[in-house]
Image (cartoon, rainbow, N blue to C red):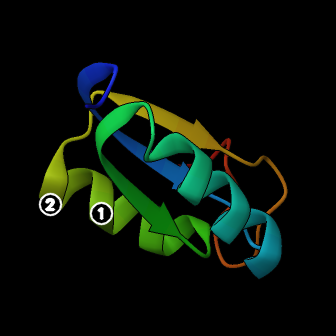
């Protein structure tokens, strides 16, 4: 059973790090969306409206601060 009924968006440009943390976050949140860059994170945010967002500041295309 998931610990929290919240949805989450995690954006990280490093594939291995993104995969590892996404797997970890899935133990705690009902749904975890992963993005490889800021543009993808921006699109997922407006489509899925997650309750929690974690963004890496330095990402390609659009950085975390701009998102």
Position of residue 50 relative to residue 44, above or below, is above
Q: Is residue 38 found left or right of 42 in the rendered image?
A: right
Residue 14 in view in this figure: no
**Measured from the top left, where is residue 46 in percent x and y?**
20, 54
**Which residue is painted at 67% across and 78% down in the image?**
61
Query: Cα distance, mark 1 to mark 2?
Result: 5 Å
Residue 50: quadrant of the picture = top left
SS state under label 1: helix
Camera-nearest residue between 56 and 23: 23
**Mark 1 near mark 2, Cβ–Cβ under 8 Å?**
yes
Residue at the farthest front position: 1
Residue at the farthest top position: 4
Residue 15: quadrant of the picture = bottom right
Residue 39 in view in this figure: yes
**Measured from the top left, where is residue 17 in percent x and y?**
80, 65
Camera-nearest residue between 27 and 55: 27
The mark found on residue 47 in the picture is 2
**What crowding class fits label 1: few (fewer than 14 Cα within 10 Å), some (14-19), or many (20 or more)?**
some
Position of residue 22 relative to residue 16, above or below, is above
Q: Is residue 32 found left or right of 23 in the rendered image?
A: left
**Which residue is painted at 75% across and 72% down in the image?**
13
Which residue is the site of mark 1? 44
Q: Quadrant of the N terminus?
A: top left
């Amino acid at each position: 059973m998931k610990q929290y009924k919240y949805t989450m968006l995690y954006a990280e440009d490093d594939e291995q790090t993104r995969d590892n943390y996404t797997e970890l976050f899935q133990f705690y949140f009902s749904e975890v969306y992963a993005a490889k860059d800021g543009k993808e994170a921006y699109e997922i945010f407006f489509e899925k409206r997650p309750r929690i967002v974690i963004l890496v500041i330095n990402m390609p295309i659009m950085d975390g601060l701009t998102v």
